[in-house]
Image (tube, rainbow, N blue to C red):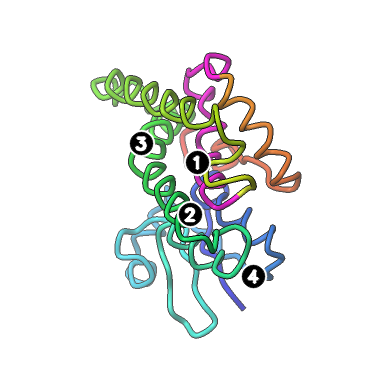
């Protein structure tokens, strides 16, 4: 059976839980206490040298790190990774976009905001906010003419960008300023369905949130 090394408040890990659920794949969960340093133990670093969750350990003991790489692995031969060459490349485009423009920006600001780390990172905040606005503007332009990021139905591109994108208001962005993004969030939410809650950092007494 697959094993997911997880941390519930992580939206990167949330992506993987969503796709596993949508595909109906059974898996075991190992919760990783990241604030207590568990992701930097010798044992965990053998699974992911970068020391971050999520990690998916396969049945043969091999491991895959990086949330979007895990999504690609799981989505093979499923509707969530298009078979069409162009649409598949579009899905990959948005996976790269998410890891460069969304997760390090909105994800970081959200983490700092919700765990009381905004003040200590105040020198970086203005640049992150400007980058977040640019990212949301790019999404707004792209979603005016298409229901989903890589075609007419939900793919791993949407799951990846939605993970932190739909939580942008947690760190001060106004999604009302981006009507096409807001409409896409509603469509993605409906397509994903219930059963995948966003867990606050406050559930972890070690987070500072």
Q: Report the number of numbered marks.
A: 4
Residue positioned 61% across, 41% down in the render: 199
In this view, the mark in front (3 or 2): 3
| Real-space CA distance between mark 1 and mark 4, rounded to the nearest whole angstrom | 23 Å
| Residue 111: numbered disc | none
Magenta stretch bounds: 155-178
Pointer 1 or 4: first along the chain? 4
For the residues bearing labels 2 and 4, Cβ distance under 8 angstroms: no
Q: Is residue 159 above or below residue 176?
A: below
Q: Position of residue 207 (x, y in %)?
A: 47, 39
The first of marks 3 and 4 along the sequence is: 4
Residue 161 disc label? 1
The one of 29 and 83 positioned closer to us in this rendering: 83
**From mark 2 to mark 1, how far is it between C-alphas?**
25 Å
Verify CB contact (< 8 Å) between mark 1 and mark 4.
no
Which of the two labelled residues, at mark 2 and mark 1, occupies the earlier sequence position?
A: 2
**Residue located beneath label 4 in the image:** 27
Between label 3 and label 4, give the one nearer the viewer. Answer: 3
**Sequence-first tag of 3 and 1:** 3
Residue 138 in the image: above or below residue 11: above
Q: Residue at x 63, y 48 (%)?
A: 154
Residue occupied by mark 2: 33
Q: Secondary structure at mark 1?
A: helix
**Label drawn at residue 101:** 3
Q: Mark 3 or mark 2, which has the lower sequence index?
A: 2
Cα distance between the residues tagged 2 and 4 = 19 Å
Q: Is residue 194 magenta?
A: no
What secondary structure is the magenta-colored segment mainly?
Answer: helix
Earlier sequence position, callout 2 versus callout 4: 4
Q: Is residue 206 left or right of residue 166?
A: left
Q: Quadrant of residue 23?
A: bottom right
Compared across the picture, whether 177 is left or right of 103 comes to right
């Amino acid at each position: 059976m697959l094993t997911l090394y997880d941390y519930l408040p992580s939206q990167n890990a949330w992506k993987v839980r969503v796709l596993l659920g949508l595909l109906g794949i059974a898996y075991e969960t190992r919760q990783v206490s990241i604030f207590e340093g568990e992701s930097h133990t010798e044992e965990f670093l053998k699974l992911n040298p970068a020391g971050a969750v999520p990690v998916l350990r396969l049945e043969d003991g091999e491991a895959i790190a990086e949330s979007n790489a895990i999504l690609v692995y799981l989505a093979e031969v499923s509707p969530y990774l298009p078979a069409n060459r162009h649409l598949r490349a579009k899905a990959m485009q948005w996976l790269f976009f998410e890891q460069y423009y969304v997760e390090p920006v909105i994800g970081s600001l959200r983490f700092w905001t919700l765990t009381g780390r905004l003040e200590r990172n105040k020198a970086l905040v203005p640049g992150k906010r400007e980058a977040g606005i640019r990212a949301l503007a790019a999404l707004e332009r792209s979603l005016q003419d298409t229901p989903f990021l890589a075609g007419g139905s939900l793919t791993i591109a949407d799951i990846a960008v939605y993970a932190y994108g739909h939580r942008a208001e947690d760190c001060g962005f106004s999604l009302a300023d981006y009507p096409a993004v807001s409409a896409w969030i509603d469509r993605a939410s409906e397509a994903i369905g219930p059963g995948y809650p966003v867990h606050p950092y406050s559930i972890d007494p070690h987070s500072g949130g």
